[in-house]
Structures are given as C-alpha cells and as structure tokens.
Amino acid sequence: MTTALGALAAEDSPPPPPPPPPPLEESGPTTVESPSSGEWSVKGQDGLLDKSTGHVRQPMLSFFLGFPFGTGYGYSGYYGVFNFGLGARFYIPIVQEGFLPMLNDSFGIEFGADTIFVFGGFGYGLGFALGIPVEARWSFHIFPKLEAYAKLGIGLGLFFWSGVTPYPIFVANVGVLFRLNKTFYLRAELGSPAVKVGIGIAF
C-alpha cells in the first residue's frame, strides 16, 4: 500500500525545470573611428595638443618642383616670363620638443639648392639661375599624419645670363607635410620665392 501511494505521489509531482541555456559569447561594441579620434585627433598621441615628451623627429631629404614668381630669385624674376625649377632640401631636427610646452611643435634647419630655368621675353632667350638657401623651419604637428610649418631663410643666388651675377635670396614660406607611411611624405610650400610641391624621404 505504501509503495502504491509513493508511486502515485511521484506521478503527481511536476517535472523538474529545464536546464538554463548556455551563455552567449560576449562581443565588444563595434567602434568606428571618427575624425576626432585616432590618427585625426589633435588631442591624441602625436596630435597638436599632445603635451608628452620623447617625440622622435626624423631627418628628411626632400625633392621639389618649383615655380618662382616675382623677384624672389633676383634677376630670374626680372627677366623671366615663365620660370620653373628643381630643388632639394635636407632637414635636420634641432629642438625636438619645440618652444611651446602646450603644443606639439619642433624646430630644425633645412639647407639645399634650387635650379631655376628662366624663359625670358622681349628677346632675352633662355637663362639659368642657381639658389643656395639655408632655412629655419618651425613645425606644428597637427595630426599624426599632417604637419604644418613656417620657414624663414636667406641664401646666395647665381644668375647665368651673359655672365654670372650673384644676388641675395630671402625665403618666407608656409608649408605642409602629409605622411604616406613611415618613410615617404608629400610636401607643398607657398610663399617667396616660389610655389613648390614635392616628396620627402625620412630617415
């Protein structure tokens, strides 16, 4: 009798609850980089407002195609109707952390040479000029891939046209560098004595 009652009680009891489902794999939220983060952030690493120290400024060899205008290159500007030139610069960083502690800046020296081909008007024919400038460059590292700078410099020019005529060169430029990778950069400059575009190779 007792066994029969126990069997009936077992039949009337509810079934046990099912086991809980296995935990789902957690995945982090998908993030999309915006212009205010990462390589386009003025507050991030290597941005304009990066106040940390220990930045590495690399020497750079650059090559330019330039279009002189005015009298910045002396007699070539006076006699020339259409001028263009090829130039090279070597940059040496001097003050790695710049002069403004609140900004990510740096300072260095560039020197090199410019060759200017002068196509004259009024029967002057073709001339040639050589410029040898030394320039001080103050750079502001706005984003990890973008740098803006200002340059001031002086130099010696030699104008070859019915003899050799020396003349002074005065440089006042603003420019930008855009980093393609760790080695190669695009460069552009605007000012006196020329508008220039070129490439830079960092070491």
Image (cartoon, rainbow, N blue to C red):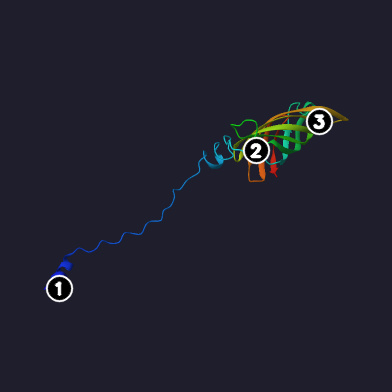
- According to the picture, the residue beneath numbered tag 1 turns out to be 3
Camera-side mark, 2 or 1: 1
Count of numbered marks: 3
- Residue 27, x across and y down, in percent: 43, 52
| N-terminal label among 2 and 1 | 1
| N-terminal label among 3 and 2 | 3
Q: In which quarter of the image is the C terminus?
A: top right
Q: What residue type is labelled 1?
A: Thr
| Whole-number angstrom distance, CA of label 2 to CA of label 1 | 93 Å
- According to the picture, the residue beneath numbered tag 2 turns out to be 177
- According to the picture, the residue beneath numbered tag 3 turns out to be 157
Of 197 and 119, nearer the camera is 197
Say which residue appears at 83% left-offset and 30% top-offset: 159
| Whole-number angstrom distance, CA of label 3 to CA of label 2 | 26 Å
- Residue 19, x across and y down, in percent: 30, 61
Residue 60's mark?
A: none
The reply, left or right, for residue 180 in relation to residue 63 is left
Q: Can residue 134 be seen in this view?
A: yes
Q: What residue type is labelled 3?
A: Gly
Of 125 and 64, nearer the camera is 64
- Residue 111, x across and y down, in percent: 76, 35
